[in-house]
Image (cartoon, helix red, strand yellow):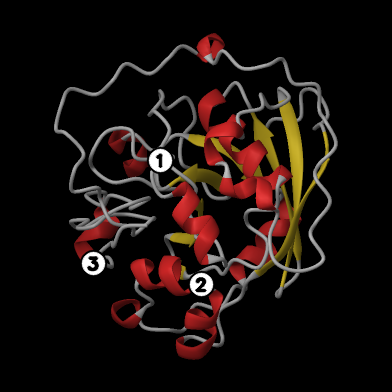
Amino acid sequence: MRRVNWFVAAVLIGTLFFGCKAKEQTAEAPPPEQPKAETPVAPKAETPAPAAAAQPEAAASAPAPAPRSGYDRALLRAAQLKEKAPETFQVKFTTTRGDFVVTVHRDWAPIGADRFYNLVKHHFYDNASFFRVVPGFVVQFGISAYPPVSAAWEKADIQDEPVTQSNKRGYLTYAKTSAPNTRSTQVFINLVDNAGLDRQGFSPFGVVDAPGMKVVDMLYDQYPSNSGPDQDQISKLGKPYLDKGWPKLDSIKTTTLIGAAAEGAKP
């Protein structure tokens, strides 16, 4: 994962870029990862139309059982995890602070929804920390607790897609750099309405339930933003690196697919 510079006050105004893989994210928003130095500055590839995700028709298949220890070895084959997600589905996050449920709507951002579905199904986010919590802005997570898994997904970026929903409080969106098509596994939850991110191409794909936002609001946020963990080191060293330097950070115990969302349940 690439390194991302932490926000400065100006970032909150909308000039930020989240680093899903940012080696040098200028005042970037949510995902501070490192932008790929190699990413060609070519015109943005056209986002495939929603229906163009040519992937196997996905009936909501049963999630892979959570591994008793370690991680699901299927995660080491990132290129093969391309199952199409149901039109709506829900994910239960069990965290060190409590539980919350996310409802994903594939029609909001089909490419992002499919990626999230596959990551959750194979427990990518289990044991991962909420490594960046900026009060009044966002909560960010999505770097695996296991270095081999992080390495397997380092170059597994997905294409950008149109912003169909605003970055409202509680909405989930992928982190990315200022370069095109750099979304990967990092996700952030908007703590407030961040409409300024809409113009920067951040495409929400799901939303946390109202009761669950009370849990999200309680995630530990007292480490100074200028002394947070280095994303490269999280990727290379895993959770022990965070536990040693930032022991109070909350983390995800498990994420579980709990079924399709009721039709018409969009907020």
Q: Which residue is denoted by mark 1 in the rendering?
A: 183
What SS does tag 2 mark? loop
Q: Is residue 243 visible?
A: yes
Instruction: Please tell me whether residue 136 is drawn above or below residue 202 in the rendered image.
Output: below
- Mark 1 vs mark 2: give the one in front: 2
Q: Position of residue 224 (x, y in %)?
A: 36, 83
Q: What whole-number distance in Å separates the C-alpha atoms at marks 1 and 2?
A: 20 Å
Mark 2 vs mark 3: which is more N-terminal?
Answer: 3
Picture residue at 80% right of the left edge, 56% below the top: 66
State the separation of the CA atoms marked 1 and 3.
24 Å
Give amino acid for label 1. Arg
Q: Amino acid at mark 2?
A: Gly
Residue at image point 45% right, 88% down: 245
* Vertical arrangement, residue 241 with respect to residue 24, above or below: below
Q: Is residue 181 left or right of residue 15?
A: right
Pointer 1 local density, CA inside 10 Å: few below 14, some 14–19, many at least 20: many
Q: Secondary structure at mark 1?
A: loop
What residue is shown at x 46% (from left), y 11% (from top)? Answer: 49
- The kind of secondary structure element at disc 3 is helix
Q: Which residue is mark 3?
A: 9
Mark 2 burial class by Cα count in 10 Å: few <14, some 14-19, many 20+: many
